Amino acid sequence: MRIRTNHLRASLLATATNLGAREKAVTLPSGPAPHAKPDSGWALVTGASAGIGKELALGLARAGWRLVLVGRSAERLEAVRKSLAGPRAEKAVALRSDLSEPGAAARLYAECASRGIEVEILVNNAGSGVFGPAVDSDSADVEAMISLNVTSLTGLSSLFGRDMKSRGGGRILNVGSFAGLNPTPYFASYAATKSYVLNYSIALRAELSGSGVVVTCLLPGYVRTEFDGNAGIANSAYLAFSNANSLDAATVSKIGLTALRRGGAWTIAGATNRLAAAFFAILPKTASPRIMKAALDRILASKGKA
Ligand SMILES: NC(=O)c1ccc[n+]([C@@H]2O[C@H](COP(=O)([O-])OP(=O)(O)OC[C@H]3O[C@@H](n4cnc5c(N)ncnc54)[C@H](OP(=O)(O)O)[C@@H]3O)[C@@H](O)[C@H]2O)c1
């Protein structure tokens, strides 16, 4: 029995270690080439005003990239722009855009083109969630989330990806979620958008293979940001659980930037999340949502409701 348990643990660990690392990686220099044209070296980060996106922007600026910071709040973007440090930090621009609006991706692309900005690294990080029983969710909130998490991410990947392909190089980092690996009760539509992000990223990566454009997907688990509040989560027991099991945004951003540099297909942030993903991967598709629902119901019932 003991041998069998050890064997299962070893194979779970092996699966967890290999998840997301099955393809040969292509390493990106940590910053733009020293001989790069003075107007080159642009990295665009959506959702750069807070959370993971802000940390990704800070990290890319430190590595020498010129930043295009995108979000809805001009004030917060400006504060991030001023806080950037690095050799080209003062060249950063902030572009206000609500990426949940129809046509937002095309307008943002056109704005960059009109400024002569050639994006070499695209980070599709902006995203939102809608938490609670799916049948009780506000349909306008769900539509806005799908437009942001799916439609704009797809549009930006396609528009900037086309330019990268014609130039023979570029990087796209799409921020998915651990939740996208499995059907997730109470985050049903959010998790489904993140399944889309993962599958779309892997397919796009395959299409672009050999073109010099590399697509990577980052899958964070719980992260201490404004995400839970913005998703309408008020249950204190859930928030305590999420907080206790979370990584901070700076750690997740470091994992994301390493993944971007290495150019693997996808990476799950955090050893515990990788182990949990490996565990769920060996279960039948319908088992993980049943397990998660039972666990969430217990947590949610301990104080307040979803
Ligand atoms: N936190 C987590 O537990 C967690 C776990 C897994 C995956 N993720 C994913 O990680 C990504 C970043 O999330 P986060 O945790 O850093 O969340 P956050 O703290 O809520 O930050 C979200 C960022 O996206 C921007 N944003 C939101 N709606 C937007 C819109 N309609 N148009 C343009 N920008 C918008 C926000 O800026 P403005 O408000 O100024 O627009 C902000 O900069 C998301 O894709 C999320 O799904 C998060």
Image (spheres, helix red, strand yellow):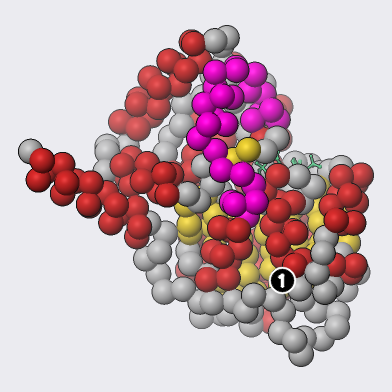
| Residue 18 appears in view | yes
Which residues fall within the magenta stretch? 228-253
**Horizontally, is 252 left or right of 77 in the view?**
left
Reply above or below: 99 against 81: above
Reply above or below: 132 against 266: above
User: Identity of the amino acid at label 1?
Assistant: Ala
Q: x, y (%) of residue 275?
A: 36, 46
- Asked which secondary structure carries label 1, the reply is loop
Q: x, y (%) of residue 131?
A: 59, 25
Quarter of the image with the N terminus in it: top left
Q: Residue at x 22, y 52 (%)?
A: 11
The reply to whether the magenta stretch includes residue 147 is no
- The one nearer the camera, 149 or 101, is 149
Q: x, y (%) of residue 295?
A: 40, 22
Answer with the quarter of the image where residue 114 lies: bottom right
> What secondary structure prevails in the magenta region?
helix
